[in-house]
Image: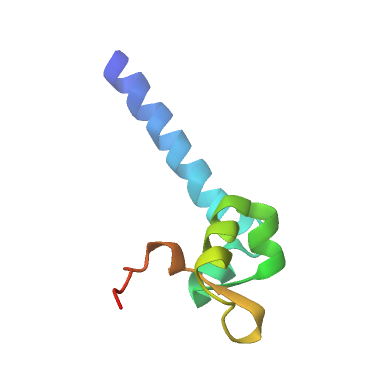
Amino acid sequence: IWHASAALIYIAMSLGHIYMGTIGVEGAYGNMRSRYTDETWAREHHSIWYDEVKSRRSAAPGGAVPAGAPHAPKTSL
């Protein structure tokens, strides 16, 4: 019973996560598809990530924030 209950909870959480990433949050799917997001959207939905990206690099062309920027490997000079 515990295993079945945990599986159902996991499935429900996975479906909720998929919903939020596609149609639950306006702009989320388009941002994932294009790999860029508007600065305003990034600041409103992911302020910690936005601050980290802004402190590392300047904005991408058109004011977009590169989606992979926080996880990009650092290069030594």
In the image, 41 versus 1, the foreground residue is 41
Residue drawn at x 54%, y 56% is 49
Whether residue 20 is visible, yes or no, is yes
Percent position of residue 30, x then y: 58, 71
- The vertical placement of 12 against 39, above or below, is above
Where, quadrant-wise, is the N terminus in this rendering? top left
Quarter holding residue 58: bottom right
Locate residue 70 relative to residue 77 in the image: left or right.
right
Please report the residue visible at 30 percent of the width from the left and 14 percent of the height from the top: 2
Q: Nearer the viewer, residue 3 or 47?
A: 47
Q: Nearer the viewer, residue 9 or 43?
A: 43
- Report the residue that reaches farthest toward the front: 77
The image shows residue 72 at horizontal and vertical percentages of 36, 68
Expressed as whole percent of the image width and height from the top left, the position of residue 25 reads 65, 55
Residue found at the very far top of the displayed protein: 1
Identify whether 20 is placed above or below 41.
above
Q: Nearer the viewer, residue 72 or 3?
A: 72
Quadrant location of the C terminus in the rendered image: bottom left
Residue 24 in view of the camera: no
Give the left or right position of residue 17, taking residue 76 as reference.
Answer: right
User: Residue at 70% across / 55% down in the picture?
Assistant: 44
Quadrant housing residue 69: bottom left
State the residue lying farthest toward the bottom: 61
Residue 66: image location, x then y, percent: 51, 73
